Image: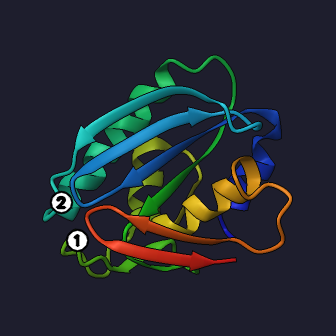
Amino acid sequence: MTSQVISERGLGGVSIGVDIGGTKIAAGVVDAEGRILRTARRPSPRHDPAAVLAEVAEVVNELRSGVDGTIVGVGVGVAGGVDRSRSAVYFAPNLAWGQVPVRTVIEAATDLPVVVENDGVTAAWAEMKFGAGVGLQHVVMVTVGTGIGEDRR
């Protein structure tokens, strides 16, 4: 899973995780043990991809200003379909997005490596790594927010 890249690199620093939803952008600084060190939350200007990504970059830069140490990367979870080879969102119905180059834009605005994944996948991965799914071989997660999604690992 692409989200593992940031966690594995995170052994020498912290990561910034961002959840882009239909109504809000939530972000946090997370250490390699999964502890949330700092958070931020903003409303999502959801029908304007450029405005959303500008807001994400602003939040990431705000969070990084309070970090004492190395930030190894940014993980972005988006409610929609993600082209993993380009870390771009090809369809996000709750955001009215299509073909949005999330990684390219956020990397340019923050000068940090970025990984983009479906938000249900990132949530399932986090539960397997740090939460209710620790030690389990298979986990099924159903997410309910502005929309409904699922992931099976």
Q: CA distance from mark 2 to mark 1?
A: 8 Å
Split into 4 quadrants, where in the image is the C terminus? bottom right
Question: Is residue 148 in view from this perspective?
Answer: yes
Secondary structure state at the residue bearing disc 2: loop
Residue 58 disc label: none
The one of 21 and 69 positioned closer to us in this rendering: 21
| Three-letter amino acid code at the position of disc 1 | Asn
When the figure is inspected, residue 88 is found, relative to residue 130, above or below; the finding is below
Question: Is residue 118 in view from this perspective?
Answer: no
Instruction: Please say if the residues under marks 2 and 1 sit with CB atoms less than 8 Å apart.
Output: yes
The one of 83 and 36 positioned closer to us in this rendering: 36
- x%, y% of residue 146? 25, 64
> Tag 1 or tag 2, which sits nearer the N-term?
2
When the figure is inspected, residue 41 is found, relative to residue 23, above or below; the finding is above
Which residue shows up at 30% across the image and 76% down it? Answer: 92
Residue 46 disc label: 2
- x%, y% of residue 82? 46, 78
- x%, y% of residue 122? 57, 61
Instruction: Tell me where residue 23 sits by quadrant.
Output: bottom left
State left or right for residue 73 relative to residue 22. right
Which residue shows up at 63% across the image and 16% down it? Answer: 68
Split into 4 quadrants, where in the image is the N terminus? bottom right
State left or right for residue 21 relative to residue 38. left
Residue 94 disc label: 1
Secondary structure state at the residue bearing disc 1: loop
Looking at the rendered image, the disc whose residue lies closer to the viewer, 2 or 1, is 1
Which residue shows up at 74% across the image and 32% down it? Answer: 13
| Three-letter amino acid code at the position of disc 2 | Arg
- x%, y% of residue 10? 75, 42
Which residue shows up at 30% across the image and 54% down it? Answer: 53
